[in-house]
Image (tube, rainbow, N blue to C red):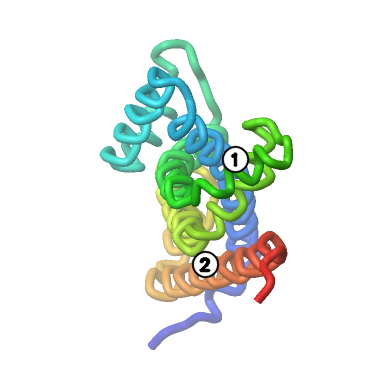
């Protein structure tokens, strides 16, 4: 009934799509989390105007569909002279999406930070930035680390829509294969398993990073 062997000639297509999805996930996760941490600190401790500007950005991203954001970047920006390749548009869309969500997640950790940690930084003679980076930020991220991990995985899975602008990711590979051999069930079943594998792998990697990042704790 099912013929998964028909997918074997397209192994290189799936592999290329898988590698592209991994590349997109790694880049968007790194840049998105860096921006998220910076925006969270700016919104919590920055000037009022900056905090409000970031709040508008967050509300805009969180209350509009990801695919609309993607289409705006890829199809809309060229109207004002900003031309991007499909890959560039995809990365930017994923980064700004993750940054918006991670900003609020990290900010929640900062809000929950005890005042004693700030006082400890002052006692040690650290500046505001040094206290934030060395004393406050890591414990704050530790509090919200599971939520942050889940959000990164969600954004990785959401990259599937990038195939709509011809980014040759995993979903693009599945669409291409099933259009050639008409094995839709087999193609999308294998693709679903590969996304599942990536999600599990990302969680494992985050767990390893978390253990090292929060190794200062003494149980």
Q: Quadrant of the C terminus?
A: bottom right
Outermost residue to the top: 80
The reply to whether the C-beta atoms of the residues labelled 2 and 1 are less than 8 Å apart is: no
How far from the left and from the top, in percent, is residue 71?
37, 33
Tell whether 9 sits left or right of 59. Answer: right
Within-10-Å neighbours for mark 2: few <14, some 14–19, many 20+: some
Q: Is residue 139 above or below residue 136?
A: below
Residue at 59 percent across and 43 percent down: it is 119
Depth order, front residue of 151/67: 151
Q: Earlier in the sequence, mark 2 or mark 1?
A: 1
How far from the left and from the top, in percent, is residue 168?
55, 48
Whether residue 31 can be seen here: yes
Kindly identify which residue carries mark 2: 199
Whether residue 157 can be seen here: no
Quarter assignment of residue 27 = top right
Depth order, front residue of 175/30: 30
Tell whether 150 sits left or right of 5. Answer: left
Q: Is residue 97 above or below residue 43?
A: below
Q: CA distance from mark 2 to mark 1?
A: 21 Å
Depth order, front residue of 27/136: 136
Within-10-Å neighbours for mark 1: few <14, some 14–19, many 20+: some
- SS at badge 2: helix
Residue at 69 percent across and 72 percent down: it is 218
- Of discs 2 and 1, which sits in the foreground? 1
How far from the left and from the top, in percent, is residue 6?
53, 76
Outermost residue to the left: 63
How far from the left and from the top, in percent, is residue 40?
48, 38
Tell whether 81 sits left or right of 138. Answer: left
Q: Which mark is residue 34?
A: 1
Residue at 49 percent across and 64 percent down: it is 146
Q: Is residue 18 above or below residue 183?
A: above
Q: Quadrant of the N terminus?
A: bottom left
């Amino acid at each position: 009934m099912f013929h998964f062997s028909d997918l074997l000639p397209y192994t290189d297509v799936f592999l290329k799509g898988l590698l592209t999805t991994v590349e997109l996930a790694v880049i968007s996760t790194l840049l998105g989390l860096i921006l998220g941490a910076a925006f969270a600190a700016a919104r919590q401790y920055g000037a009022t105007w900056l905090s409000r500007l970031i709040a508008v950005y967050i509300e805009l991203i969180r209350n509009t569909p990801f695919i609309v954001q993607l289409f705006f970047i890829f199809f809309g920006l060229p109207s004002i002279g900003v031309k991007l390749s499909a890959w560039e548009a995809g990365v930017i869309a994923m980064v700004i999406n993750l940054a918006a969500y991670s900003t609020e997640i990290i900010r929640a950790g900062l809000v929950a930070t005890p005042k004693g940690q700030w006082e400890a930084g002052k006692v040690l003679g650290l500046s505001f930035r040094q206290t934030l980076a060395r004393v406050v930020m890591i414990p704050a991220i530790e509090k919200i680390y599971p939520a942050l991990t889940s959000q990164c995985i969600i954004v990785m899975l959401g990259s599937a829509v990038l195939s709509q602008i011809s980014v040759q990711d995993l979903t693009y590979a599945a669409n291409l294969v099933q259009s050639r051999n008409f094995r839709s069930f087999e193609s999308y079943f294998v693709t679903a398993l590969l996304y599942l594998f990536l999600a599990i792998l990302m969680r494992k990697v985050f767990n390893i990073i978390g253990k090292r990042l929060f190794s200062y704790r003494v149980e």
